[in-house]
Amino acid sequence: MGRRPWLLLLLLGLGLASAAAAAVAEASEGDADPLYKACVEECQNTGSLKETSIKHCMVPTDGTPADKSWYTHEPLYLQWKEWNCKSECRYHCMMERENDRAQLGLQPVKYHGKWPLKRASVFQEPISAALSALTLVVQFNGWLSFFLLLYYRLPLRPETHKTYYEYTGLWHVYGLLAMNSWFWSAIYHSCDTVWTEKLHFSSAAAFLGYSLILAILRTLNLRDEASRVMVAAPILAFVTTHILYLNFYQLDKGLNMKVCTVISIAQFLLWALWAVVTRHPSRLKIIFVAFGGVVSVFLEAYDIPPRWGYVDGRAICLAVAIPLSYLWWSFAKEDAEMRTSAITKKTR
């Protein structure tokens, strides 16, 4: 009977997560606009847009075959962005149409599944890229301080020189996956190409899937290897299948959003319920992170239109992730200190 409230709340949270994920708008009104289509076609044919020359559409005069894209003559550090005549015309026509819409008092619309955001130098989404990089730094600092705490400040087992904390290895893997996920998030928001999108989605799915495993193992206090394998195996199988589907069958953004939303809500609910039931010393931090995470998930599902040309709902979620990451590693360190103290007292 005591476990029924946990189950009911978890099912309720998963239902809300599915509803939020299903509410994500997938249609793109902007690229269906006849004026936008005509602008892109004219830009590709003439190589210019009003007073702006699109160098990627210019035909080379140095004897190079005309069917080779102009961007292949750029430096390597720019070639990786895969900007070409079509993508450049789409960007400049999108900005022109949005300026016209703004003068008419109309709200921004999506183009090819994405909000119209302004570039800055070589960065396609400069605010989101910078926030992802800052979160990466916070994750690295949190993992490093966790490592130093366990191996240089807390006592080690005298016979094996290993830590007393039973979840050390799990947190190390968590840190590595977190840093990998935020690294590719920064790359993806700097340059949106097919391969950066796949790496971003894949690394995020792997990180969230492992986060759910960690949540289950810690909240249920599973320490033996058999129990851990029984929990981890089905989740790893599902996440691996999902990643393979995205990379080798169809890069379905809507499906990926639903999967990541459900996984995120599930782990946040687990942590929050565990913090309340167990009265963990860091329960306020856990509850704050869980609440902030749920709010962040729903903000991203709501898909807030851009403001000032650079900030959209995704950027707001990335900004929220910075303090949440700091608090989360703070909880991990306090949990390690608490468990180490409890174990060493028993062994005396």
Image (cartoon, rainbow, N blue to C red):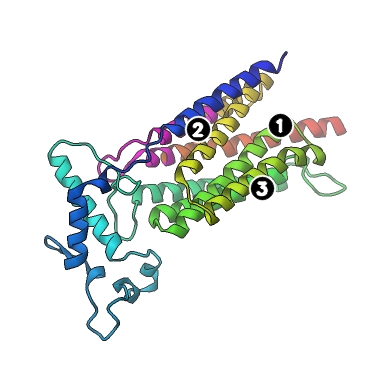
Residue positioned 42% across, 36% down in the render: 300
Image quadrant occupied by the N terminus:
top right
- Look at the numbered discs 1 and 3 and tell me whether their residues touch, using CB distance below 8 Å: no
Check disc 1 and give the amino acid type.
Answer: Met
Residue 254 visible from this viewpoint: yes
> Which numbered dot is residue 338?
1
Q: Marks 1 and 2, Cα distance to the nearest angstrom?
A: 24 Å
Check disc 3 and give the amino acid type.
Answer: His
Q: Which residues are magenta?
A: 289-318
Is 118 located above or below residue 231 in the figure?
below
> Which numbered dot is residue 172?
3
> Which numbered dot is residue 121?
none
Decide: few, some or many residues near mark 1? Use Cα within 10 Å; few <14, some 14-19, many ≥20.
some
Q: Quadrant of residue 55?
A: bottom left
Tag nearer the camera, 1 or 2: 2
What residue is pinned by disc 2? 293
Q: Is residue 313 magenta?
A: yes
Q: Viewed as shown, does residue 172 lie left or right of 226? A: left
Q: Position of residue 215 (x, y in %)?
A: 65, 34
Mark nearer the N terminus (1 vs 2): 2
Q: Is residue 89 magenta?
A: no
Residue positioned 44% across, 31% down in the render: 298
